[in-house]
Amino acid sequence: MKINQKIFLQFGICIIFFGLIGILINNLTINLIRTGLGFNFSWLFKPASFALAEHPLPYTSSDSYAWALFIGWLNSLKVIVSSLILATLLGTLIGFARTGKNSLLGLISAGYITTIRQTPLLLQLMFWYFVGFLGLKDNMFIQIKNIFNISNQGIEFSGLIFSSEFLALLLGLSIFTSAYIAEVIRGGILSVGRGQWEAFRSLGLSERKGLIRIILPQALPAIIPGLTSQYLNLAKNSTLAIAVGYSDIYAINDTIINQTGRAIECFIILLVSFLLLNLLITNTMEIINRLILKSRKNI
Amino acid sequence: MRRLVSGIVGLAALLAGCATTNQDNSSRLNLIKNRNELICGVSGKIPGFSFLKSDGSYQGLDVDICKAFAAAIIGDSGKIQYRPLTAAERFTAIKTGEIDLLSRNTTFTLSRDSTGGNGLTFAPVVFHDGQGLMVKKESKISSLQDLANKSICVGSGTTTEQNINDAFESASLPYTPIKYQDLNQVVAGYLQGRCSAMTSDRSQLAAARSGFKNPKEHIILDDVLSKEPLAPASDGQDQKLADAMRWVVFSLISAEEQGITKSNIDEKVKIAKNNPQLKPLRRFLGVDGGLGEKIGLSNDFVVKVISSTGNYGEIYERHLGENSEVPIPRGLNELYNKGGVHISPPFN
């Protein structure tokens, strides 16, 4: 009797759920037809006819929209992965400095975290781009033996060229996220009992060794979930690329919407690409988390 | 548990309510009249066309076109809500009905006009523009060829982006486009030296240059990359609104052809009323013929339009004339009988 009731309830909820989705899809299709914009993805294979400043793979304006979107996705990935690494390194260092014994370093990193966290990311990106990189004069190259030079066109490092747009975004995202990561790291470190510190000190381990060998492994399970959500935020924040002229997937989508008028299809593509990207990040972090927990059990 | 179920049912009912689609086919013209306010999409960032003044009012040629529409439809050129839109937002804003019409330096193209494309419809062209390139005088760049392998600042999501690509590709010149979302950023990128040149419609280049510290240090190249007929636009499925808009724009041009201005309109109405033999004038000013009614407006809509904004020439002179802040020679924008291309079909 009770089981029957439960099954009935589940069934009812299923019907309502799928009904709702059905209504929404139906609503969307009717509205699309009403506004003369039937669902259609065939435009994806027409030539894009716009150029891109940055493309990790060969691209010309006669390539298809689909290829342009893929290039945009790669550009996004490039900036996300590199700022992820940079932000983690920077955030970890600042987090350590914030919890460390050196009070001057602690004060500086507290100031850093406060400043960065209290100002909007968009503003910071604009600052790095228009003031930081474009502020460098065209003729004021900083050159070191033809291997490394900086100008307002970007940085050239032994043949590799990074544009100002990419660098501003990289720097802006990394610095912004690092402040949050530093706080996550600090939280993790503080979650480890005071006794552990006293224990390794009494064993004669140095501060640095103790922090890395004793404290950090215990802090990691508390750090990883917070870190994951910061990584996800970073990935999503990368869409602000459009503000500094970097051709990420969002910026390219923007152009395509304007050329084709296919706003809904483009947003669906954008939605799916970010969903996939973020699922990838979440799952990778989940695996790392499990490995850490497992290695702890083995000890 | 019961509460949960009833909650879900309630939510479903609520969503179903939202989901009923609006299939009312009546024109937006009635909606505007009932609302007693016109929602007009503008740029808000281009001096001479639509620009927010320090007193909080919008001014410019595009803004005056909005005023002309409001005067014709509602009878009051002050009842307008301006919506500043970016290039990327503008078409979605029309299609979703967020704005009634767009008067935002939009280029009239096939794909935008067609039902298979953006599904809009365009009013007559209010400004004939062309895409150009601006460079710094000291750079010694004087033609497209000099720009090979250089960076060029472009606004993204515009025909500009496509035109510059077409021009460089057909000349087989490589270049690097640096794309920004709005014109102010394009200008900042150019002024800061990220790009050797910036490209946009020549009118916009002139407008932007007027705000520079040293306007004389920048030159607009002679190369014209495209035709850019800029026209107001509305939803392609609303024939009535499109008709009304079309003839409001023509009335501005026709008034200039006939020498009817803001200052002499009352006098002209008097003349029309007293002289039954002046048939074309009587029809134009709505004394005879009932032309306004045919397009869903009042018969004297021309009088309302001209007395609030003046004719096309007056609007042009006010915002882009020699003594304005953004002087642009009239060129193609003269009347057909003075060497330009503006002409109005007859008001019959």
Image: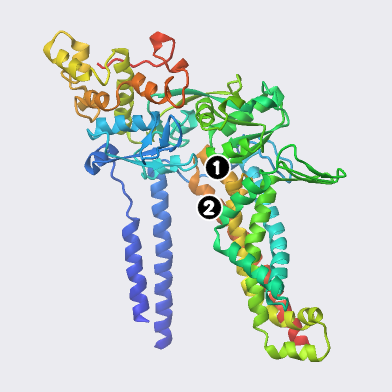
On the picture, is B211 further left or further right than B44?
right
Secondary structure at badge 1 equals loop
Dot 1: within a 10 Å radius of its alpha carbon, few (fewer than 14), some, or many (20 or more) residues?
many
Q: CA distance from mark 2 to mark 1?
A: 21 Å
Residue on which disc 1 sits:
B181
Question: Numbered disc 1: what chain?
Answer: B
Q: Is residue A7 above or below residue B168?
A: below
Looking at the rendering, which quadrant does residue B28 occupy?
top left
On the picture, is B344 further left or further right than B274?
right
Looking at the rendering, which quadrant does residue A136 occupy?
top right
Numbered circles on residues, count: 2
Looking at the rendering, which quadrant does residue B165 occupy?
top right
Where's the N terminus of chain A, which quadrant?
A: bottom left
Is any atom of residue B224 visible in this view?
yes
Q: Nearer the viewer, residue A224 or A118?
A: A118
Comparing labels 2 and 1, the label whose residue is closer to the camera:
1
**Of the numbered discs in the image, which one, if any, rests on residue A268?**
2
- What amino acid is labelled 2 in the image? Ile
Q: Is residue B150 above or below residue B222?
A: below
Percent from the top left, x then y, of residue B212?
Answer: 55, 32
On the picture, is B264 further left or further right than A164?
left
The residue located at (26%, 26%) in the rendering is: B305
